[in-house]
Image (spheres, grey):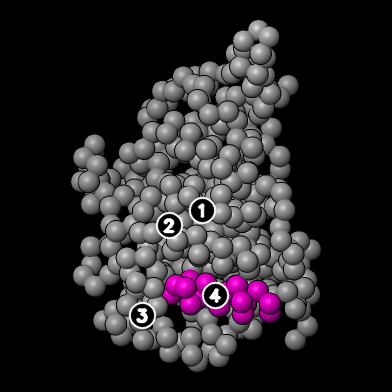
Amino acid sequence: MAFIAPPTPLRLAVALDGLGWHPAAWRTSPADAAAVFTADHWAGLVREAEAGLLDLVTFEDTFGPPTDAPGELNGRLDAVLVASRVAPLTRHIGLVPVATTTYTEPFHLSTALATLDYLSGGRAGWQARVSRRPGEAALLGRRPAPIGEEAVRDLFDEAADAVEVVRRLWDSWADDAVIRDVATGRFIDRDKLHAIDFAGRWFSVKGPSIVPRPPQGQPVVAALAHGPRSYELAGRGADVVFVTPSDEAEAAEIAARFRAPEPALKVFADLVVFLDDHGGDALARRNRLDDLHGSSWHSDALIFAGSPEQLADLLVAWRAAGIDGFRLRPGALPYDLEAITRLLVPVLQDRGVFRTREPSGTLRSRLGLPPAVNRYESPEGARVA
């Protein structure tokens, strides 16, 4: 089979969660389960991803334990804080934590993520998500969990407003607002600070931010989308959308959905990955984890178990169908992450579809996103993606 390199390089990310995405992964990991609560655990994983020349890593997060089921890994660290901790330990890879818009003030999100962009030198992103589970609502105690279509619609409308407020706060300082004029004693030019004056159903925010405009101007905003509501949220406010097609035809259909209205939106397909030199070994590992789990585990994303060559075939085919990149969810850590970086990446490089040197520049530029023009400083006052 002849492989034709795509016009732009294939983009590759990994999604990190605990000791792997399979709920029984912690039971076979060489790492102690308590390692997920240490900085060394996360630093080691991100360094491995960076050594594999990947574009970015995402860090999962939820309010409350990820699951209440017995026998599964419970508890997690805050994703934004973990990303901030590993930022100074890495040089090139993008860092994209999950942070929920539900029960969270956009002002706090904007400052935390702008801080991450400074600490990483322009490599920060944010995967915005909503919190729909009853346990999350009970934990926070601010309002009941959404029930019914109207309540779910409100949840996503609130999320869209939260993303808009965060973006406006990032723009509320001009790039040259900090002047450090010793003679006059002026540290900032107050004419370069902008009140965002956002007034909506859920938020009323005056602004400006307390953090200067981030190095990227606008850190990369991502969203995971499975259906109409989340597709709409991604189209309204995201730079990158993570989608979960089940085959090549659905990948093409989803890519076309986002390509027409939002040509700058980057579409990444999610896959849960069990990877070994021999595909049969990967499948055997997945089956072993299912046995430990007590049932066959299913994910929102397609579960792949096979060899690097087989996975490369799939990625190249879906790339030709219109997918910009892929976010691989390692089934078990660190094994499947190392298989991605040490087995899959060389295969993709041999086929001419993946980089062979460290990526440079900001995360925005690496993903092919347009420069983030400040809406309050541009002549047209244009909204930036």
Three-letter code for the amino acid on which mark 1 is drawn: Val
Do the numbered discs 3 and 2 sit on residues whose CB atoms are within 8 Å? no
Between discs 3 and 2, the one toward the N terminus: 3
Disc 4 target residue: 338
Q: Is residue 232 visible?
A: no
Three-letter code for the amino acid on which mark 2 is drawn: Ala
- Secondary structure at badge 2 equals helix
Q: CA distance from mark 1 to mark 2?
A: 8 Å
Tag 2: Cα neighbours inside 10 Å, few (<14), some, or many (≥20)?
some
Q: Please indicate whether residue 73 sits to the left or right of residue 208 in the image.
A: left
Q: CA distance from mark 1 to mark 4?
A: 18 Å
The residue at 23%/62% (across/down) is 68
Quadrant of res 331: bottom left
Disc 3 target residue: 28
Do the numbered discs 1 and 2 sit on residues whose CB atoms are within 8 Å? yes
Q: Is residue 359 visible?
A: yes
Disc 1 target residue: 86
Q: Mark 2, mark 4: which one is toward the viewer?
A: 2
